[in-house]
């Protein structure tokens, strides 16, 4: 009897197979592993659990966590809790999608290919760009790939990135830049927005690209029109990292003349999952089409003239070009891109606008209520669904007390910016009710 | 599968339909202009679809029926380890206590997540024989690049800045040379010998002061175990280089041998191959990296540490190469892999590799009379066939792959590795029954026969799929990468 439900081989099977091979024992198949490197004994891995015990153990681990469905949360900072229509998970559980590989055989992968083609279209619509790839690991790695692509395209080595971009994205960018011997120059933040004077002074004909975030890390809406003028002054490329939900309300980066728009589609149907897996998106204008990293799905016809879809422009990719590829990335986040497409289709044209509008209204309500209660709202400019408040105590301490009251407070900015330990980045999505917002305000008042 | 051409979701959209139920706006509204100045207001809404919930469900259900997955049928795609993706893994990853965690919640609120991550790090260290694992890389290629950046940092810290070359076998995955270049190295190719193994004399010639690392998959992409691994390790180490283990083929070695014991300094694992997390049609995956002690200081922070009964993130890596990914890696995928490891236990994992290898050898021997088999050595978890014999009859490997579609199988990997003519690379995995292997072999044997007797049926395949062979040339020459109503009209 087999002890393992995923292993169908019986003793009889094994014997028949050994006979076919012409060996007497299975060990003979490992004769080519040198004796001195053969592993002897038992791997130091915990013992197997039967299904019932396994469920209990995994529930124990999950149960040790506080999840954001049990407590109202005001955390955002690049990862957001949003409405996820029930259909999303049901469709993602169609195992023809999740148990498939990259669609290299188009004849039996039309579903996946079409789903991704639709995703690419939706991203183009949101960003108002000419084309989008099939997705990337996440927003920050998409941003980094955009910077690398720009340096390759412009044959320049300097990357200008605003300090109002997500700090972890800047970290990932810097790690990558080392590999390519590129220079990352940070542009100062002035009152929560990119300092235009500093950007202008650091920009030169060595600049491959200018990277900004819209809305930025502090929730503020950057002046893309002015940034565009600077970014394009000497043929640099303009890269905008954008929360795609905000584009339900905000004028698209493509309409401001961005060359590359990246971001994370996580707000559409993808649970927060402690930060991953999410779903980077990558959109460009037409002149960069053959420089795009990652997979691209294109429409074509089959030998009978029927419409169909294939992976295309593969000459850019590592499995063809090897060391000359535009990127080493092999996978994308297809399943999450599919999830995002399903969510975007459910939310739809007007739903997206409504959802973005609710985020903005609720965040502004929260900021007004906090200001009215006497708290210092640091954010001065226009913001989408996040803003910064400064307290007279450290946020770390405030959050501990808020949690005791059943509320998960916003991000302690001191985590990334020494000196900002008393500033909190508060995110308010459509899921926060008036009651929950009011409860946050009164809990904070109680801590004064 | 269904034959009906499936409309794009945009084509079924109708003004005014909805598929959602958004919360109500229960706060006092203020005029838009008080929140946003006019220059930032979007005038034209994005043209997202407008469909009802049932239309949406029918659409994606129809798409799923036009797709082949492991649950649909056998998927012997070499080097991809298309094994069964357990259902319980999917359930567990969806527990609210895993799915709905925010990365910036305080450590005290996510102790269960940290415990899981710690245990996974520990298990992968035990399985690979490495000293410390990071769960941050998102996928295999990302892991490769991370590992190479660690090696680069190590050499630089030792003042060895002249180590600019990474040696890669000619049979290596395309990601290897590509990752080397992205990490700032030059990729140098070492030849394979007639047995399909790295040519040691050539390796000796290449190894030197400028060698940063050798990247190796063992078993290699031909499915052969590099028997001379101990000697290879000493050639590279004596030259001052590091050994990188591409873990794409780890399904052959669980509990059999460990990269750490073979002399490797860095390893990445593809949790979406060996550890049953789904491929998802191209991702998300997860590509943890393990290293030996001398590379630990360079790891990307944070790493999960245990202190008494509690767990915390350690950022104490002063020489770190920096983050390679925001937050903590693909946590949701890592939950699935850990669930699998706990399902199998140490003996179960060993059985996985033993049975994967037995399955592959069994198929190899059954198919050997009908196809050219370039190498005599026992294979490991996968093997290669050459379609040379069939090519002489006018039937290409591509044709045979397409013909397999008519039998309901996903074809093997084809035309890879590059050093085998008309290559077919077959990886059955351990989760397939002998009956499935037999049926697949029968189909292959029938196709070999067809190539002799009735080549047209193979050359014109597939005959039963929802679409025929696609015009890929036009797709690349005149790319249509998004839907626009006008372009669709012209196709019609």
Image (spheres, coloured by chain):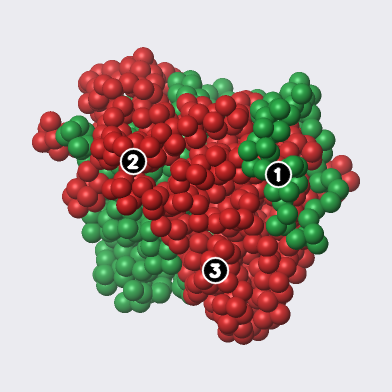
Q: Distance between the residues labelled 2 and 3?
A: 30 Å
Q: Which of marks 2 and 3 is nearer the N terminus?
A: 3
Question: Where is residue B272 shown, x and y percent of the image?
Answer: 58, 42
> The disc numbered 1 marks a residue on which chain?
A
- Residue at image point 67% right, 43% down: A22
> The disc numbered 2 marks a residue on which chain?
B
Q: Distance between the residues labelled 1 and 2?
A: 31 Å
User: Both on one chain, marks 1 and 2?
Assistant: no
Q: Name the residue under label 2.
A: B451
Left-right relation of B43 to A400: left
As drawn, the chain in red is B
User: Both on one chain, marks 2 and 3?
Assistant: yes
- Residue at image point 38% right, 37% down: B449
CB under 8 Å between callouts 1 and 3?
A: no
Q: Name the residue under label 3.
A: B193
As helix, strand or loop, the secondary structure at mark 2 comes to helix
User: Both on one chain, marks 1 and 3?
Assistant: no
Left-right relation of B434 to A64: left
Question: Where is residue A289 shown, x and y percent of the image?
Answer: 27, 56
Q: Name the residue under label 1.
A: A23
As helix, strand or loop, the secondary structure at mark 1 comes to loop
Position of the C terminus of chain B, as image quadrant, is: top left
As helix, strand or loop, the secondary structure at mark 3 comes to loop
As drawn, the chain in green is A
- Residue at image point 29% right, 36% down: B454
Q: How far apart are marks 1 and 3 (CA)?
A: 26 Å
Does residue A141 appear in this view? no
Task: Report the residue that reaches farthest toward the top.
Answer: B54
Question: Where is residue A303 shown, x and y percent of the image?
Answer: 20, 37
Q: Quadrant of residue A61?
A: top right
């Amino acid at each position: 009897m087999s002890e393992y439900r995923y292993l169908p081989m019986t003793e009889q099977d094994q014997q028949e197979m050994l006979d076919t091979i012409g060996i007497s024992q299975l060990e003979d198949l490992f004769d080519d592993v040198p004796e001195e490197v053969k592993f002897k004994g038992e791997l130091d891995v915990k013992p197997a659990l039967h299904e019932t015990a396994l469920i209990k153990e995994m529930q124990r681990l999950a149960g040790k966590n506080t999840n954001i469905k049990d407590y109202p949360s005001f955390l955002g900072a690049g990862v957001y809790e949003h409405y996820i229509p029930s259909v999303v998970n049901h469709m993602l559980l169609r195992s023809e999608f999740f148990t498939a590989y990259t669609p290299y055989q188009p004849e039996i992968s039309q579903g996946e290919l079409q789903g991704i083609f639709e995703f690419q279209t939706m991203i183009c619509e949101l960003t108002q760009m000419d084309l989008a790839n099939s997705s990337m690991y996440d927003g920050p790695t998409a941003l980094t790939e955009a910077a690398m692509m720009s340096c390759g395209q412009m044959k320049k080595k300097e990357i200008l990135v605003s300090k109002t971009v997500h700090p972890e994205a800047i970290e990932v960018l810097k790690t990558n830049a080392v590999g390519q011997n590129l220079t990352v120059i940070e542009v100062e933040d002035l009152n929560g927005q990119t300092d235009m004077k500093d950007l202008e002074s650091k920009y030169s004909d060595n600049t491959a690209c200018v990277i900004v975030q819209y809305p930025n890390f502090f929730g503020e809406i950057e002046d893309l029109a002015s940034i565009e003028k600077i970014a394009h002054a000497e043929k640099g490329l303009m890269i905008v990292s954008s929360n795609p939900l905000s584009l339900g309300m905000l004028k698209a980066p493509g309409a401001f003349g961005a060359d590359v728009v990246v971001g994370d589609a996580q707000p559409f149907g993808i649970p927060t999952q402690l930060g991953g897996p999410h779903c980077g998106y990558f959109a460009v204008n037409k002149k960069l089409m053959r420089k795009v990293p990652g997979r691209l799905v294109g429409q074509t016809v089959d030998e009978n003239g029927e419409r169909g879809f294939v992976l295309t422009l593969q000459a850019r990719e590592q499995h063809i070009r090897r060391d000359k590829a535009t990127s080493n990335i092999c996978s994308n986040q297809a399943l999450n891109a599919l999830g995002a497409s399903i969510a975007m289709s459910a939310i739809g044209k007007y739903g997206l606008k409504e959802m973005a509008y609710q985020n903005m209204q609720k965040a502004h309500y929260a900021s007004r209520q906090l200001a009215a209660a006497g708290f210092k709202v640091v954010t001065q400019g226009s913001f989408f669904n996040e803003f910064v408040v400064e307290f007279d105590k450290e946020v770390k301490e405030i959050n501990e007390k808020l949690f005791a009251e059943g509320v998960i407070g916003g991000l302690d900015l001191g985590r990334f910016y020494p000196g900002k330990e008393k500033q909190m980045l508060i995110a308010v999505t459509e899921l926060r009710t008036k009651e929950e917002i009011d409860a946050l305000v009164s809990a904070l008042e109680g801590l004064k | 599968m269904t034959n009906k051409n499936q409309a794009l979701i945009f084509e079924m959209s109708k003004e005014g339909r909805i598929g959602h139920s958004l919360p109500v706006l229960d706060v006092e509204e203020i005029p838009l202009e008080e929140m946003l100045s006019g220059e930032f207001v979007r005038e034209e809404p994005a043209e997202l679809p407008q469909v009802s919930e049932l239309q949406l469900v029918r659409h994606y259900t129809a798409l799923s029926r036009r797709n082949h997955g492991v649950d649909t049928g056998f998927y012997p795609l070499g080097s991809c380890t298309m094994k069964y993706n357990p259902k319980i893994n999917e359930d567990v990853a969806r527990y609210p206590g895993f799915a709905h965690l925010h990365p910036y919640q305080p450590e005290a609120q996510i102790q269960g997540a940290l415990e899981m991550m710690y245990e996974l790090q520990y298990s992968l260290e035990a399985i690979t024989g490495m000293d410390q694992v990071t769960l941050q890389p998102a996928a295999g290629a990302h892991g490769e690049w991370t590992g190479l950046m660690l090696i680069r940092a190590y050499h630089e810290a030792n003042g060895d800045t002249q180590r600019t070359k990474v040696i890669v076998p000619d049979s290596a995955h395309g990601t290897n040379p590509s990752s080397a270049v992205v990490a700032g190295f030059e990729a140098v190719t070492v030849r394979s010998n007639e047995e399909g193994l790295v040519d040691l004399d050539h390796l000796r010639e290449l190894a030197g002061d400028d060698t940063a690392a050798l990247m190796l998959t063992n078993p290699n992409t031909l499915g052969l175990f590099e028997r001379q691994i101990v000697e290879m390790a000493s050639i590279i180490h004596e030259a001052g280089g590091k050994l990188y283990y591409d873990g794409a083929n780890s399904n052959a070695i669980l509990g059999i041998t460990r990269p750490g014991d073979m002399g490797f300094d860095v390893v990445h694992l593809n949790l979406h191959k060996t550890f049953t997390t789904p491929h998802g049609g191209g991702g998300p995956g997860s590509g943890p990296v393990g290293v030996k002690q001398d590379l630990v200081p360079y790891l990307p922070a944070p790493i999960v540490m245990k202190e008494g009964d509690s767990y915390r993130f350690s950022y104490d890596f002063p020489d770190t190469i920096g983050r390679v990914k925001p937050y903590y890696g693909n946590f949701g995928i890592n939950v699935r892999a850990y669930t699998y490891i706990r399902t199998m236990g140490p003996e179960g994992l060993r059985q996985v590799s033993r049975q994967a290898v037995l399955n592959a050898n069994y198929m190899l021997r059954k198919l050997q009379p009908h196809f050219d088999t370039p190498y005599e050595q026992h294979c490991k978890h996968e093997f290669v066939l050459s379609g040379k014999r069939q090519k002489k009859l006018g039937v290409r490997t591509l044709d045979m792959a397409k013909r397999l579609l008519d039998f309901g199988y996903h074809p093997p990997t084809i035309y890879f590795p590059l050093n085998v003519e008309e290559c077919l690379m077959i990886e059955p995995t351990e989760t397939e029954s002998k009956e499935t292997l037999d049926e697949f072999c029968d189909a292959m044997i029938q196709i070999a026969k067809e190539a002799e007797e009735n080549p047209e049926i193979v050359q014109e395949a597939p005959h039963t799929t929802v679409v025929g062979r696609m015009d890929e040339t036009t797709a690349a020459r005149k790319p249509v990468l998004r839907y626009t109503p006008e372009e669709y009209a012209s196709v019609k």
